[in-house]
Amino acid sequence: MSLTTLKLLEKRFPISCASTSTPTSERAQSNVVNLIRNKAAPRGGRGRVFSSGHVTKVGGASKFISQRPLNQLPFFFFPAFKMSKRGRGGSSGAKFRISLGLPVGAVINCADNTGAKNLYIISVKGIKGRLNRLPAAGVGDMVMATVKKGKPELRKKVHPAVVIRQRKSYRRKDGVFLYFEDNAGVIVNNKGEMKGSAITGPVAKECADLWPRIASNAGSIA
């Protein structure tokens, strides 16, 4: 900031001399320094936050020096939040990242009393995807599936389903690793409401927390 700019700032922001013992020049200089700190301090590019620094007098002009990004200061901490890229329609709340053990093409047991025996996964809802990567589902995920064995009125149709158990071990927040005896799911609608009225076997806690209608029909939650 040039000396001319500082003089213009002094003219624009005058200070009255009444009832003070500080000389006018010192008050004017203090006013300019505060103005530089609050208004004319350079800002960091690309959203970076800088420390306040201090103002020093160099060659008759005030200069703002000692700028450091706040994330480089030892006392400042920016927490890193990891956002999930997977969306879930009809579920309540977010899901902790677990190991996915059911890729597209997997055949799982149907654990409800709709009359379907198994479910063939053809897609996973909420997957944005990556080139040549096969979408996979885990406990609590909604999938689109077809019935390979079961009542004729259920076969040759695409049904939404939710995975309630998987044989692939996954880690919980408390550090426990868990896996089930089989891979199983239940047929639901787009709102997450079950088509059947009963569930055979336990339901994973991750699934019960996400889908309250499934939890209400579960015999046991593991």
Image: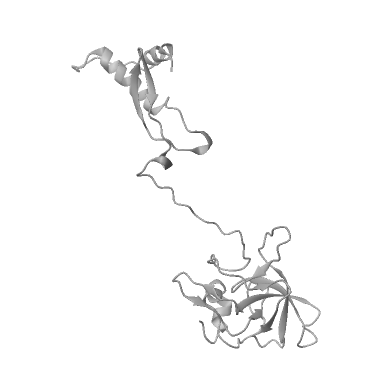
Q: Nearer the viewer, residue 222 or 210?
A: 222
Q: From the top left corner, tell me how far across and down residue 34 is, in percent.
A: 34, 25
Q: Residue at x 33, y 15 (%)?
A: 14
Q: From the top left corner, tell me how far across and down residue 130 is, in percent.
A: 69, 58
Q: Residue at x 67, y 76 (%)?
A: 161
Q: Quadrant of the N terminus?
A: top left
Q: From the top left corner, tell me how far across and down residue 64 is, in percent.
A: 39, 24
Q: Nearer the viewer, residue 104 or 36?
A: 104
Residue 11 located left or right of residue 93? left
Residue 154 located left or right of residue 203? right
Residue 133 vertical position relative to residue 9 in the rendered view, above or below: below
Residue 187 vertical position relative to residue 29 in the rendered view, above or below: below
| Picture quadrant of residue 97 | bottom right
Q: From the top left corner, tell me how far across and down residue 60 is, in percent.
A: 35, 12
Residue 187 vertical position relative to residue 99 in the rendered view, above or below: below
| Picture quadrant of residue 157 | bottom right
Q: Residue at x 50, y 75 (%)?
A: 177
